[in-house]
Image (spheres, coloured by chain):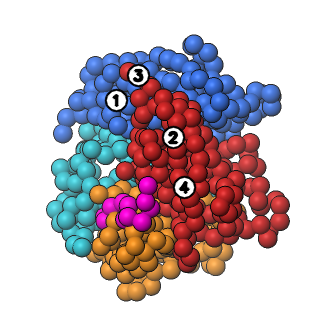
Chain colours: A cyan, B blue, C red, D orange
């Protein structure tokens, strides 16, 4: 029952994503946060590449994130900025690829209620 | 770590579905939207066929949708109209079949809260 | 792309279940409904057996349900009565077994909001 | 259709976890409970070991729990105390390992609404 081996998959998909438009002012910006929780149970760091897909334009990316060995990272899509911020007010999907197995859960937080969440699902992994 | 290959499965199932009856007037119609988010990571377009199942009548369909290569589509069941609209006020289930691998997530949006969602789960794929 | 074959698995598990106690009066009874949505895409009827597990007593069952071919059934655990109603105010889990493949989704409905749901997940299938 | 065999997997992962900080006083402490529902359908007891992972420190554990044969256990992370309570106000992930197959569902309860839940998903199993 070792927990140091790398559990999970190397490709994860979250089809559903949406960040409210900034044109609605600062309040709605604070209401909802799309989060991908990435767990790396192995000893080696996970080098993660995220690609964002849209309905009507080419995919954006790669966004690069590292999750150290035996660490978790709760990643907010609102915070992604390089190569460019994720567009507000647009439907998107994300593909999360890692060089070592990880496990990914998609959660939408509603910060009006002190870290309560509105929805959550284990992503699709293969 | 290419994202251009087609990730996913070709058969997806969402057992739970419900669109509020229109007899309750326009307001409840706006409250809840059943959505299937379809991501096609491959280069080829995905030709998708949706079949709707009911408790007490024969299935309806096929509903035909195309998702271009490297694009996502957030499909609202309320918008399906050909061969016929999905009946309001009735429980239904949906089967989503594609000629190339895609990934499907089921989400119920509550539009009273600016695109917040009430529930979400990766569909059953095989 | 036929939808008449039986899609899914024959064993499904929903670890989380809870029906509010009736001692709180009729109102809370109406607030929340545990639902298992069962889809049978095949032509043959699905003979389903449900077993309910508890923290501190032997399992209850079998509860027997039939889902006709090419039909869906949205089953409320509140309605199960034979061999006995599911105890109120107690944590439980359910195992759903079928003689033909089906797909099962667990949903908790909050009837205060006209069939909105609070949570949903595809059950564990094998 | 026996339900006495052990259904499930022996390794389960819940990437998303958060317990509100106690510094906000007793009320928020009561609002949200992270729960892992563990079902053991087999005849033998399940000896379960839980390890908690963090963004910025070494994992904590092992937390040891037993689920008797043919029983379910709805485990609240708030209640884990040995070797140490799960830190409040910190993101975490959990790995749940068992010596016999079990099935695990992650649920966040909001106790303001009489055991209603905010989110739920079957954990990642392998």
The magenta stretch spans which residues? D1-12
Crowding near the residue tagged with mark 4, few <14, some 14–19, many ≥20 C-alpha atoms within 10 Å: many
For the residues tagged 1 and 3, is the chain the same?
Answer: no
For the residues tagged 3 and 2, is the chain the same?
Answer: yes
Disc 3 element: loop
Q: Quadrant of residue B84?
A: top right
Residue underneath mark 2: C46
Given residues C50 and B62, the one toward you in this image is C50
Crowding near the residue tagged with mark 1, few <14, some 14–19, many ≥20 C-alpha atoms within 10 Å: some
Given residues D108 and D2, the one toward you in this image is D2
State how far apart marks 1 and 3 are (Cα). Answer: 12 Å
Residue B65, image x and y in percent?
Answer: 45, 18
Q: Chain of mark 1?
A: B
Label placed on residue C2? 3
Q: Chain of mark 4?
A: C
Find the residue positioned furthest to the right: C26
Given residues C41 and B80, the one toward you in this image is C41
Residue underneath mark 4: C50
The reply to whether callout 1 and callout 4 are in contact (CB within 8 Å) is no
- Above or below — where is C29 with respect to B107? below
């Amino acid at each position: 029952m070792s927990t140091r081996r790398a559990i999970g998959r190397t490709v994860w998909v979250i089809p559903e994503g949406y960040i409210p438009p900034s044109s609605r002012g600062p309040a709605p910006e604070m209401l909802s946060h799309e989060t991908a929780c990435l767990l790396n149970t192995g000893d080696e760091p996970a080098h993660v590449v995220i690609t964002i897909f849209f309905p009507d334009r080419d995919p954006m990316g790669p966004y690069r994130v590292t999750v150290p060995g035996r660490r978790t990272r709760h990643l907010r899509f609102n915070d992604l900025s390089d190569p460019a911020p994720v567009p507000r007010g647009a439907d998107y999907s994300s593909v999360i690829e890692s060089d070592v197995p990880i496990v990914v859960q998609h959660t939408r937080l509603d910060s009006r209620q002190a870290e309560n969440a509105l929805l959550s699902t284990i992503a699709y992994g293969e």
